[in-house]
Image (tube, grey):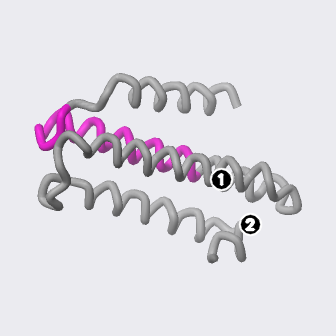
Amino acid sequence: ALLSTFPHLEAPWAFRAQLFALLLESLDCSAGLQREGAWQHIAALWRSEVALASQWARSHPEYCETASRLAGRFEVHILQELAAVVAAAQSDGCLDPAPASLVTEALEALDRFKTA
C-alpha cells in the first residue's frame, strides 16, 4: 500500500528492499529452512520482487521517470542482496552453492542494467 501511494518517493522502495534483505537473512540454517529447498525459496522471492518492480514501472506511466528510476534502483539493490547471499553461502557452508541457473539469471539481470 505504501508503494502504491508514494511510488515517486524513494522511501517506500528502500523499505521494500530492506524487507527483502531481512527475508533473505531469515532464510538461513538457524531458521530451520531445509537445505535442499533454500535456493528455490530464495530464487522465487528474488524473481517475484523483480517482477513487481518491472511491472510497476511499466504499468504506471503517470509517474514518469522518477518511479521508473526508483524501481530500477530497487532491482539493483535486491540483486546486490542476492549476490551477498550467494557469496555467504559459499564461505560459511550453511547452504549448498547456488545453482548455476540462478547465478546465470542474476548475471543476465546485471547485464541488462549495464546496457540500460
- Which residue sits at x=18%, y=34%? 96
Give the residue at the far right of this rendering: 62
Q: Residue 89: give x, y in percent of width and height.
A: 21, 39
Amino acid at circle 2: His
Which residue position holds label 2?
8
Q: Nearer the viewer, residue 99 or 15?
A: 99
> Image height check: is 112 above or below 77?
above
Relative image position of residue 90 (x, y in whole percent): 19, 33
**For the magenta stretch, what is the residue range?**
74-96
Mark sitting earlier along the chain (2/1): 2
Q: Indicate left or right for 104 with 25 as reference.
A: right
**Residue 71: image tag:** 1
Looking at the rendered structure, the kind of residue marked 1 is Ala
For label 2, the SS is loop
The image quadrant where one finds the C terminus is top right
Check disc 2: other Cα within 10 Å, few if <14, some if 14-19, many if 20+. Answer: some
Residue 90 shown left or right of residue 46 in the figure: left
At x 53%, y 64%, the residue is: 14
Q: Quadrant of residue 30?
A: bottom left
Q: Is residue 27 above or below residue 12?
A: above
Q: Nearer the viewer, residue 107 or 9?
A: 107
Is 6 positioned to the left or the right of 18 in the image? right
Q: Residue at x 35, y 23 (%)?
A: 100
Q: Main secondary structure of the magenta part?
A: helix
- The crowding category of the residue bearing disc 1, from other C-alpha atoms within 10 Å (few below 14, some 14 to 19, many at least 20), is many
Residue 41, magenta (yes or no): no
Query: What residue is rendered at 47% in x and 49% in y?
Result: 78
**Location of the N terminus (image quadrant):** bottom right
